[in-house]
Amino acid sequence: MKLTEPKVITFWISVALAALGVLAAQGAIPGLSAYAFWLVVAGFVLLALANLMKDL
């Protein structure tokens, strides 16, 4: 399996999704609290896919 470095924008989008999920879980963003877990999962899945796929 060959891993590639994700693009900078993809990395920051995944960090932003994970950060939103953590903040929502802590109650700082009440509107997203129901989706907190899925925001964190989406961030990490995006980062994993960016490592596995070229040019993502």
Image (cartoon, rainbow, N blue to C red):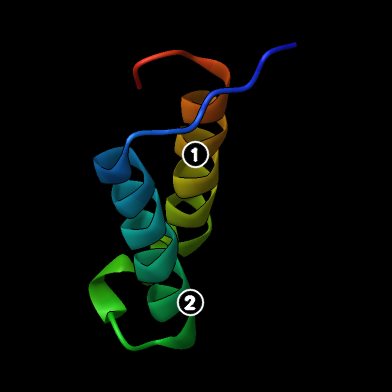
What is the x, y in percent for residue 52? 57, 19
Tell me which residue sits at (45%, 35%) in the image. Answer: 46
Dot 2: element: helix
What is the x, y in percent for residue 25? 48, 77
Q: Image quadrant of residue 33?
A: bottom left
Tell me which residue sits at (38%, 75%) in the image. Answer: 24
Q: Quadrant of the N terminus?
A: top right
- Name the foreground residue: 12 vs 27: 12
Q: 10 Å neighbourhood of mark 2: few (<14), some, or many (≥20)?
A: some
Tell me which residue sits at (68%, 13%) in the image. Answer: 2
Looking at the picture, which amino acid does disc 1 mark?
A: Leu
Specify whether 48 is left or right of 30.
right
- Which residue corresponds to mark 1? 47
Tell me which residue sits at (40%, 58%) in the image. Answer: 15
- Which residue corresponds to mark 2? 25
Mark toward the viewer: 1 or 2:
1
Specify whether 5 is left or right of 1.
left
